[in-house]
Image: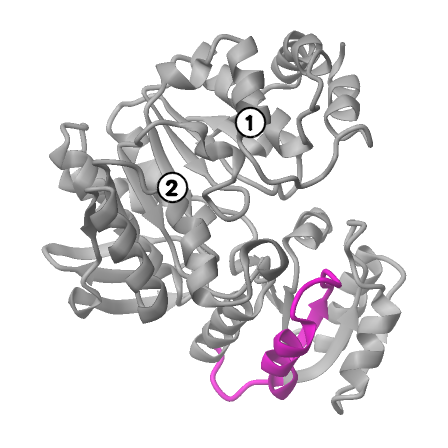
Amino acid sequence: MNYNEALSYIHSVFWKGSVPGLGRTRELLGKIGNPERTLKFVHIAGTNGKGSTAAMLSSILERGGLTVGLYTSPFINRFNERMQVNHVCIGDEELAELTEFIRPHADSMTDSPTEFELITALAMEYFRRKQCDIVVLEVGMGGELDSTNIIDTPEVAVITAMGYDHTKELGSTMTEIASAKAGIIKEGGDVVIYGENREAEAVFERVCAQRHARLHRPDYSKLIPGAFDLTGQSFSYGSYADLRIPLVGAYQLRNAAVAITAAEVLRDKGWPITDETIRTGLKNTTWPARFEILQQNPVFIVDGGHNPHGVKATAESLQRIFPDRKFVFLTGVMADKDVEHILGLLVPMARRFYTVTPNNPRAMPAEELARRIAALGVEALPCASIPEGVRAAIDFAGPDGVVCAVGSLYMSGDVRSCF
């Protein structure tokens, strides 16, 4: 099996999409020798900020001299990004070999695994073979029934910012959504939460008490923003003075406070983390398509905000860096998202929209999205492709303008490829 054959098998229509439950993952992992039982984990759930927080924590742990696995989704440019060791993506030949190894086990199952379950099992075997000291493991969706939740009590569980997303699968109320994400809280574990959502916090407090888990919160009163520009921002947090992250979004400072809090929990458990590894880890964090500046003149930003909570954070970052400006938006969305709420956040800030259809079967067609925007009183032009949309947005913005591509992570890779 070569790389393309491996990807074809992983993405095959044979796989069933999202089907909640842990039984298939447990069965598949059992067939390949339960590689997850040889590994230690940081488990990360939440609505927004999971990937950024995972990237910061993995960078901090790596600076401690550890072999660190990182499992995230979705990918931006290449599938291989989903499983990394010390920020090096799995190689094409390694992925093909692993898929060939796991395929007969998956094919032998009466209840076939879903695509995400298969990828999770591949990642666990990959991290075992790479002898990772610790794996930063991002939940795919929810928590309790997500296939990553087959692990035992992690070194620390992290629940990032909460908002409304995947409501069809997780529930329509914040209590229901928080209950699903609280599923990663294990007996006797340590849990770090982002906070700032009292309804969700009440759920996490209750589940921690039931499972004798220790709850940790960042103290945002100790978070002091410093200078910021298009290359990153500085801040202080408690005893840590003049820290820096190369991530521009205003929301990243609180993600950094969450990552620091989790790192301190790990340090208390004996992991090799010092003030200096925290400092250098944050400074060297890389995470694409999260308020990422792709060019200047005009400024072109790509941000993976794809639900109201995430897009609100994007809008706040734009207003912080470019006060009293109007923006050219390149936008594509999934049809099953809260499109009306997302557009309500962006329309007041817009000079013009260019709409595109992200490469995903759930995507809303560019023409329909343009009609919805135009009905709100702002000019919106549909584009036949993402490269066409990028060119049109840049031309209209002019050298002194600002373009922001936002609405779906599924279009971010194609946007980045244009640069």
State the residue lying farthest toward the left. Answer: 239
Q: At x 80% / y 72%, what residue is drawn?
A: 369
Q: At x 38% / y 54%, what residue is drawn?
A: 160
Pointer 1 with pointer 2, Cβ within 8 A: no
Q: From the image, state whether disc 1 or disc 2 is nearer to you.
A: 1
Q: At x 52% / y 65%, what residue is drawn?
A: 164
* Res 27 quadrant in image: top right
Whether residue 414 appears in magenta in the rendering, the answer is no
As drawn, 207 above or below 20: below
Q: Locate residue 386, reporting x and y percent.
A: 80, 57
Left or right: 156 as drawn, with respect to 200: left
Where does label 1 land, which residue? 23
Left or right: 367 as drawn, with respect to 47: right
Q: Which stretch did the figure color magenta?
A: 322-349
Where does label 2 land, which residue? 184
Left or right: 354 as drawn, with respect to 39: right
Frontmost residue, 70 versus 400: 70
